[in-house]
Image (tube, rainbow, N blue to C red):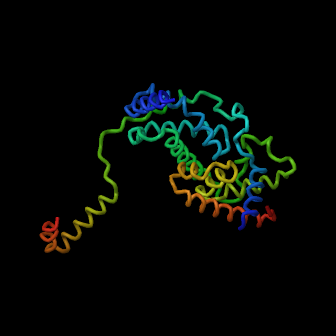
């Protein structure tokens, strides 16, 4: 697709769905209500999260892999510690 | 000017520490930017208001992860983009016409009256049927004409990736419109 075709498509899009930005900054859309009380309500309703450490799935996979190697190749364990 | 920056840094630090008054100050300062950014993407006033609330709720939850040495606005915009993307994914039309999703566009009077309602509907449908990530890139780059760097920052991708998404979106839009007998 060449630049002219892209430009024509852009014009069609903007004609069908005009940009939301008004050239006059005073007329730019703003929220019609005060959103702060609802934000406060949502924050207050949020259950306090217990302090816990989340372990990413990758760490679990790595630990599983090491355990698997240790079980299937026990002779590799001293070698592993040697190079650690 | 420097005083403003220092004041904002102080507010951001207090916000990170969980100070509600500081969070409200940031909300009052940035809510319009966040709202307008979301409105550009979803093109519906009521939905943009709801997503602005969702965005600031997420900002509050993620406050400890915010790097205070960076600007607040781009970070807020990225969270807003993510909230809008999640909304689009849930409300994405999988088949056929998307109903009146784009009928509530904020400035329909500015639409070209010569362009038939049917063509407008086809264009809106073509856009709504794009994969969400391509749709956001197309709306922001082609309709709203936002700078590619700004779009890249908001989506958390590179400028090259933005260009690629816009290119793919353009090709899909053109194919869809061609099938409807509309040649831009």
Q: Quadrant of residue B125?
A: bottom right
- Residue at 80 percent of width and 46 percent of height: B111
In the rendered structure, the answer to whether residue B158 lies left or right of residue B177 reads: left
| Above or below, B47 relative to B182 | above
Residue A21 pos. (x, y %): 70, 41
- Residue at 41 percent of width and 41 percent of height: B67
Q: Quadrant of residue B127?
A: bottom right
Nearest the eye: B49 or B32: B32
- Residue at 57 percent of width and 51 percent of height: B149
Residue projecting furthest to the right: B114
Residue B147 pos. (x, y %): 62, 50
| Above or below, B113 relative to B184 | above
Residue projecting furthest to the top: B21
Residue A40 pos. (x, y %): 49, 29
Nearest the eye: B46 or B166: B166
**Would residue B158 be seen by someone viewing this image from the given angle?**
yes
Nearest the eye: B17 or B6: B6
**Would residue A44 be seen by someone viewing this image from the given angle?**
no
- Residue at 54 percent of width and 36 percent of height: B53
Q: Quadrant of the C terminus of chain B?
A: bottom right
In the rendered structure, the answer to whether residue B73 lies left or right of residue A57 reads: right
Nearest the eye: A3 or A45: A3
| Above or below, B137 relative to B22 | below
Residue B59 pos. (x, y %): 47, 39
User: What is the total number of numbered labels drawn onto the structure image?
Assistant: 0
């Amino acid at each position: 697709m060449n630049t002219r075709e892209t430009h024509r498509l852009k014009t069609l899009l903007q004609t069908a769905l005009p940009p939301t930005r008004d050239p006059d900054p005073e007329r730019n859309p703003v929220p019609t209500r005060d959103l702060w009380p609802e934000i406060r309500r949502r924050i207050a309703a949020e259950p306090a999260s217990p302090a816990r450490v989340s372990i990413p799935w990758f760490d679990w996979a790595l630990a599983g892999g090491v355990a698997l190697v240790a079980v299937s190749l026990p002779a590799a364990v001293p070698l592993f510690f040697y190079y650690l | 000017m420097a005083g403003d920056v220092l004041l904002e840094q102080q507010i951001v630090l207090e916000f990170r520490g969980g100070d509600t008054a500081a969070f409200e100050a940031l909300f009052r300062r940035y809510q319009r930017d966040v709202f307008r950014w979301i409105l550009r993407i979803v093109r519906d006033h009521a939905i943009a208001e709801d997503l602005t609330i969702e965005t600031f709720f997420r900002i509050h939850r993620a406050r400890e992860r915010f790097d205070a040495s960076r600007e607040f606005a781009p970070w807020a915009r990225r969270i807003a983009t993510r909230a809008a993307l999640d909304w689009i994914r849930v409300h994405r039309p999988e088949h056929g016409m998307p109903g009146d999703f784009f009928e509530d566009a904020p400035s329909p009077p500015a639409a070209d009256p010569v362009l038939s309602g049917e063509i407008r509907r086809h264009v809106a449908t073509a856009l709504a049927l794009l994969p969400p990530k391509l749709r956001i890139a197309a709306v922001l780059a082609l309709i709203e004409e936002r700078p590619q760097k700004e779009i890249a920052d908001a989506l958390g991708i590179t400028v090259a990736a933005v260009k690629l998404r816009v290119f793919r979106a353009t090709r899909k839009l053109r194919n869809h419109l061609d099938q409807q007998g509309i040649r831009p």
